[in-house]
Amino acid sequence: MLILSCKNQKPVAKGYQGQGKSAVVSTLSKPVQKQWKGIWSFDNESIFFSNDFEGGRLNGITSDGNNHYTALITAENTPINVSPWYAFKVWSNTPKTITIKMTYKDSRSRYYPKISTDGENFTPIDSANFTGINEGTGSFGIKAVPEMVEIKVKTTKTPTYITAQELYGSTRVKAWIDSLAAKPFISTYEIGRSRENRSMNLMEISNGQHKKAVMVISRQHPPEVTGFLAMKSFIETLSGDSPKAQKFRENYDLFVVPLMNPDGVDNGHWRHNMGGIDLNRDWQEFNQPETQSVRDFLVKKESEGYEFVFGADFHSTWDDIYYPIDSTITGEKGEIVFDWIENITNRLPQKHTNIKPSKDIKPTMVSRNYFYVNHGMPAIVFELGDNTPRDFLKQKGKVAAEELMDLLAKD
């Protein structure tokens, strides 16, 4: 399959080529099985497992003898995208090496394990301590990964976190927001509440009463941490001290919702909010409070005279890919998106990123379409790969911000 790239429509056929058209689904709430959270103990209370922290997910653990354990990971409800998030910690009264077999219900082992002793600094587990079971086939997608994995972990009295991706629960994200809000031109406030009554926090970056703005959201899907990390670098660059950033803030306001799905993130969900719904299918009916909060905010700002000139929704998938709206739909107004992609690509040629424009904008259903159809803003879904190197994520977020500032400076 060929993918049309940028406004000059050059065909490319490399790497991950993206998902197909999203099905229209009901976004009326449906039941969610809330996992039990607590501590499991084994071997006469000499070794312990816990999922009792923000983002924790471990649905069951059994001892198989000889320091071998089997972990079970299940989703919050079904049907669901195969993004089998897991996060737990393990410790023991005396040092030992244990083996943990990771098993999943209706999925395979998508995420390569990360480990940490402080819950903040994570590294991929050493490949010598990782074994795939029933290896997959192909390059991308759930069929390409092992059915199960076994990992070896050294345990001590200090808990070791074992997670699908880095932990960025609502408390840690709020601390990041508050650290930026120490700057005089950044404020943060609540625009709504989630289904479990968590704050929907928005960050406003503004030097004055401008009437042009950029809108950014992230983490509609809980496991999509790489998108969040790129977004984090993107926002830090736009709110930085460089002359380019200062000039940007002289002409544009920036509004950011870094954590669209705080309930799903803190409950360790694979995909959905506590209404059992994929939030990025609810931008037509707005049955969920999280999407309602952003919709109401945008409507309010437009009533105050704001023009939104650019929108980005940061996600993660199997590899880096851009999902803009096709230029035959957006015309001249949407050229900024394709110029932006081209400029990022020119500066970062070391990693190929496919582009998959969409001509399907109604029903709006996904954030990008809603942003464009209802608020006239050129918008994009910016997807980062699950295994994209973290230093490159930071670089890509920074370059993306710099190129956007350059393009907006020409207007």
Image: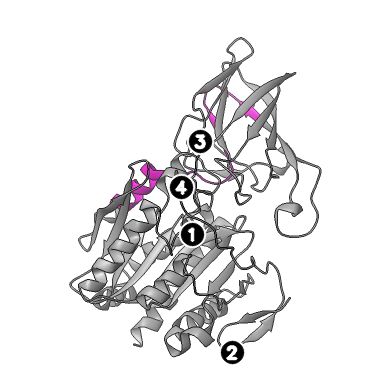
Q: Which mark is residue 280?
A: 1
Q: Position of residue 225 (x, y in %)?
A: 51, 52
The residue identified by callout 4 is 29
Q: Earlier in the sequence, mark 2 or mark 4?
A: 2
Report whether residue 398 is seen: no
Taking depth in this image into account, of 101 and 30 the one nearest to the observer is: 30
Report whether residue 356 is seen: yes
> Disc 2 to disc 3, how far (Cα)?
45 Å
- Residue type at numbered disc 3: Gly
Image depth: mark 2 or mark 4 in front:
4
Taking depth in this image into account, of 104 and 115 the one nearest to the observer is: 104
Q: Quadrant of the C terminus?
A: bottom left
Image depth: mark 3 or mark 1 in front:
1
Name the quadrant containing residue 409. Answer: bottom left
> Disc 1 to disc 2, how far (Cα)?
29 Å
Taking depth in this image into account, of 375 and 346 the one nearest to the observer is: 375
Which residues, given as a range, are shown in magenta?
Answer: 153-178
Helix or strand or loop: what does disc 2 sit on?
loop
Q: Position of residue 180 (x, y in %)?
A: 30, 56
The residue identified by callout 2 is 8
